[in-house]
Amino acid sequence: MESAENAENAEVLVKPPTLTASDRLAAKKRFRTQRRLSTMKNKVLRNAQWATLKKEKRKVKKEGQKQRKKEAEALGDKAPPKQIPRTIENTREADITTVDRDDEEVTFDITHDEYESYFSKTYVPKILITSSDNPHSKTIHFIRELTKIFPSSECQWRKRSSVKKMIQSAKEKDYTDVVVINEDRRVPNGMLVSHLPDGPTAYFKISNVKLTKDMKYKNIIKEFTTHRPEVILNNFQTRLGQAVSRMLASLFHYDPQFKGRRAVTFHNQRDYIFFRHHRFVNFKCSLVIYIATTFLHRYEFKSQKRAALRELGPRFTLRLKWLQKGTFDTIEGDYEWIIAGKRHEMETSRRRFFL
Amino acid sequence: MLPFLQVTNVAFSRFGNSGVRLKSLADNNLKFQMPCCSVVGTGLIMSSTQDFNVYVGAETGLFKGVSFNDHQTITKNLNSLQSLDRQQEITCMAWGNDEESEILMGLRSQKVKIYDTEFKGFSGCVETPFGKGPLRGVGKFNDSIITASESGDVKLWKFKASQQIEFHALTAGESLSCMRVSPYNKNIVGTGGKKNDLQLWDMENAQHPVFKAKNVKNDFLDMPVPVWVSDFAFVPNSEQVVSSSRHGHVRLYDPKSRGRRPVISCIPEADEAWTCISIASRSNQVLVGSGKGRMLLYDFRQQKVVHAYRGFTGSIRQIVCHPTKPLVVSVGLDRFIRLHHLDRQTPLHKAYLKSRLNVVLMRRDFGVLGDQDVDLDEEIVDTEKDTLWNTMEVIKDRTFTETEDILDKEVDATPTKNNGSSRKKRKTVP
């Protein structure tokens, strides 16, 4: 009777498509081990038991996949469509502020923001890059690499100047953007970008900084050229995302030199912006600037046009902390978006993203 | 087309020909006329549920009407995008008359646009160039328009140049943030700005301010406390004025009292830059909104935060509270308009308006279901869900003892910070 009960329970718990007697036995065994797993006090034995359980589960899964593949091949054209795995990006909470380019008003709002003059190509950006006081080697290397990334940029020592005063003097010297890299524990951890003539200011948290010298290929620094790179901005869906993407785009020259085969990518996924810097090796066809692809295509240029990539340059991840209207004024200024102190309120679900 | 001709005539008679340019009504899109509004002769039949009860001005220059109803929120652009640019940004807005049939909009380009809510169209555009910078205050004073620019220049515009009154409100300070005409005291106009404390002017004798606020005493380091009046509001049925500062202060001034220092000066919450203030419908309470998206209901008599409101992601630009009902409309840089009940944290309604919003106006006849002062235990009546609940079994509450009942009542009566939550605090029986 107990075995019958177990059999029933086993059937309910695990349901492979076809059940043979041996399958049933295996299921029973699995159920018994699962039930016993939480009561095992010995960590080594428990882990070993868990490993065998996982192995069996994986086996069942593989068999199912094989079966489905065989069936699909057998059916040929009439095969059911491939199952799409559920991901967090797939099941992202719908955001009302998602930009719809067909909406006249939203497009008007975007095109008439502070970056109107950049996108109408009236000026060439001139960037001032600096760091916090007494930067350590990693930060110094990082800043120097950023000057190679941004076409017309200069890096200077901080020399104890306050950000407000720095912005004031940068305006007088005709800079168009100021980038301040903040350092903590000997490593760059924050980036403040301020667009100068009264433009918006954003603060990003930097993580996972990998410098050029730590890249896979040795002496990749020799492959750096001074050609103006192409900028690719992926997956900035909401209005806030558009504002951030325009800000990042405006740091580069509006006219890229395709001859140089350099591409700089800002890829947004789950509110993390991944920065990558690539060079095309066997360049065969031209690419599109400002591709807003869906999250399923990670590096579109790699898969589509048969252009082999070589990753140059630093690699880092950004996360937006706040976006302020106007130049740097954290205490008295107006914020367009800020999450500090409101995380419980704003991060209501794992599937909600703001960019 | 007859009614529109009539409006033109009215507009001419009001503004005359003295260097004032009128925008022809043909420019204003007639297609933005409300469908409910039947134009028959001179009489307009308007249905209150489809009329806009809130008007919003955006940074792009768009003027929007919003109608908050029980079941839905309707929004509409009342002007078109074609003629807009950054210079058309609406920086200040005010009612043109007591019947709330006219709205004055001050633009960045130092113009005033006039919108007629009954005819649902723009009835004029007045050029008011005086001083530098965008218009920071606009109002109607004895049927004439009064404007204030960021450089502190305030001017009352009339037909005859001799009758025009102008004064410079910024004798000290950097810029003017706000100018308002007092709805309660005759002839009083208030101004305030960055490093320029609150001043009240009498329009009949505008050479010197009637009341010039004095700063509070130096702080513990003997340093002068910085001043930046972001917004102020006149307290109804008195001469008092409440002001908010970007340095975190909320101050109450009484011109009648002895001394020019604020009667009450306090900081509701540390490190918040208050951008706007509005008198709440409850006595001695004000609503303040900050640059970081905090909105508080503050009792300046008790000097205590009564309630905080949720839902904001960006700076709050303007708050309007209904004079009698516990309803608040707020508008900000996050491109949302939100309607809150004074006792509830989460907004009753919110709408995405696609452009950064600067100013908001609310009608006096604003009404939404559930706008009465709500008991902590009561829920908003929803007939669809009612039937669902009614069909369910009733689980009996545990019976309270007499003493516990009394203690609970005491706890409910005292105001606590979590006034809006329906959780009862249970005291231990001694």
Image (tube, grey):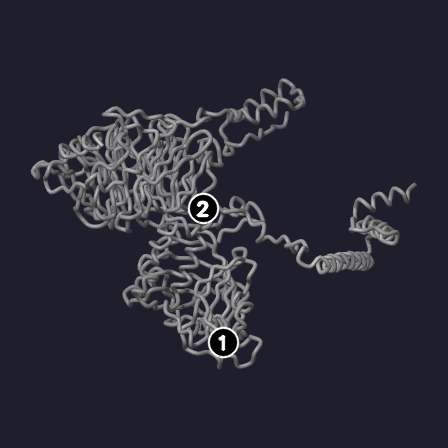
Vertical side of A176 occupied by A8: above or below:
above
Q: Residue at x 49, y 36 (%)?
A: B346
Numbered mark located on residue A107 in the image: none
Q: Nearer the viewer, residue A353 or B250?
A: A353
SS for dot 1: loop
Q: Nearer the viewer, residue B40 or B121?
A: B40
Q: Residue at label 1?
A: A283
Q: Position of residue B411 (x, y in %)?
A: 55, 26
| Res. A355 in view | yes
Discs 1, 2 touching: Cβ within 8 Å: no
Vertical side of B217 occupied by B120: above or below:
above
Q: Position of residue B344 (x, y in %)?
A: 48, 33
State the CA–CA distance, disc 1 to disc 2. 44 Å
| Res. B227 in view | no
Q: Residue at label 2?
A: B313
Q: Chain of mark 1?
A: A
